Amino acid sequence: MKKKKIVIFPVSKINGEINLPGSKSISNRVLLLSSLSEGKTVLKNFLFSEDTKYMLEAFKKIGIPLNINKKKKTLKILGSKNFFKNKKTALFLGNAGTAIRPLTAIFSLYKNNVELNGNARMNCRPIKHLVNSLIEGGADIYYKNINGYPPIIIKGGFSGGKIFIDGKISSQFLTSLLIACPLAKNNTEIFIKNDLVSKPYVDLTIRIIRKFGIKIINNNYSYFNISGNQNYISPKKFLIEGDASSASYFFAAAAIKGGEIKVRGIGENSIQGDIKFLKILKKMGAIVRTKNNTISVKRKTLKCINLDMNNMPDVAMTVAILGLFSNGQTVIKNIYNWRVKESDRLSAMSTELKKVGAIVEEGIDFIKIIPPKKFISSIINTYDDHRIAMCFSLVALSGVKITILNPECVKKTFPKYFKKFFSVISFKTE
């Protein structure tokens, strides 16, 4: 039976070490590229979470051989692009954007009859910008229910060429194209309309693709050139970094409460864009030290901040929580894409921040936060959104009791989050 809530009592102290789970963004990208590469690939520090589970279940259904060892966090996969050809099947992908979007592009390369479906929230998240671009390249894709949203039916036919994509909603649409286009019959030119969001995730995609033997030309995030009719080459082994987004909650906890948190499994040279959260922490006043594959954070008085966080929308939520403990108004701008994530995060964060006593102004693409004069013990709605659950656990560091509803939503990216969080905190005693 699911746990309906977790109660976090006021925290008196925080101190300890955390070994990070593998990055979700890297895990699903590398898993897909490995499945498209001829031969065997061994993935180490693979993240076993809800998002990767849906990708793995899809692979099993279409016949891709997998050898999984959750205890050792390893996965062996025997890949071939032939697994994605001539399929007639329906695949359920939950709320995993890193699964449904790239699989849409891959199945569109070959003659298929594949239905991709998601849960209720995924089927409210737009996919039309990606579908429109694939159709420009020759794909036959149909909406089963509502135009612009999953479920979709993919018949194949994408061959590359000159295509356009709107960059303002999700970088996952471009990532999906970048993964598929090297396998297309023709060379592809991708032109970006509007300013591209979450650019570091595109950099991440291109760097990982390069490790599988393919180079992509990126001209200032406005134009991409990809040679077609290529093959991915397995690197044989791939070690997945710890998840930088997941690390942000522990870095923030140390910055808020004091003590020291050491996070192992990620370094300052991480290929993940969210590692730049450390620069924000320093700017806000925290002490950050890095050594080899370990990062430690200590507290100092936190200063408020005014930032455009379009490139780091996930850790922008952690910054919003830091704003509760800062010395003035925190402003986070250019985050419209919060509205089309696992929940409408702008609305959700605004509502829950007010519950704990903050003064909040919510705009179409920004949020302003003035810290509470006095924190209020609250019951936090998580909207089935893993990041809201993890973010608001940190409010217990204020000295009030916080109840998190539906805490199991963290299984999407960090199934053991609360276990690890409780391992580094001590509670106040009467």
Image (tube, rainbow, N blue to C red):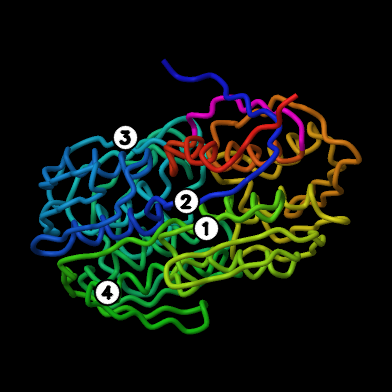
Q: Amino acid at mark 3?
A: Phe
Which residue is located at x 20 percent, y 60 percent?
A: 34
Magenta stretch: residue 214 in it?
no
Asked if the residues shown at circle 2 and circle 1 are in contact, with their CB atoms under 8 angstroms apart, the answer is yes
Which residue is located at x 24 percent, y 61 percent?
A: 33
Residue indicated by mark 1 = 262
Q: Secondary structure at mark 4?
A: helix
Residue indicated by mark 4 = 211
Q: Is residue 108 above or below residue 407?
A: below
Please name whichever residue, 362 or 406, is drawn nearer the observer in this view of the structure: 406
Separation (CA) of disc 1 from disc 4: 29 Å
Residue 291 located left or right of residue 250: left
Separation (CA) of disc 4 from disc 2: 28 Å
Residue 429 located left or right of residue 424: right
Tell me the mark number nearer the camera, choosing from 1 and 4. Answer: 1
Residue 104 located left or right of residue 292: left
Separation (CA) of disc 3 from disc 2: 33 Å
Asked if the residues shown at circle 4 and circle 2 are in contact, with their CB atoms under 8 angstroms apart, the answer is no
Q: Earlier in the sequence, mark 3 or mark 2?
A: 2
- Picture coordinates of residue 257 (x, y %)? 71, 49
Give the total number of marks visible in the rendering: 4
Residue indicated by mark 3 = 92
Q: Amino acid at mark 1?
A: Lys
The magenta-colored residue range is: 399-409
- Picture coordinates of residue 189 (x, y %)? 38, 77
Q: Which mark is residue 18?
A: 2
Separation (CA) of disc 2 from disc 1: 6 Å
Q: Earlier in the sequence, mark 3 or mark 4?
A: 3
Label 4: how many Cα within 10 Å (few below 14, some 14–19, many 20+): some
Residue 277 located left or right of residue 364: left
Q: Earlier in the sequence, mark 4 or mark 2?
A: 2
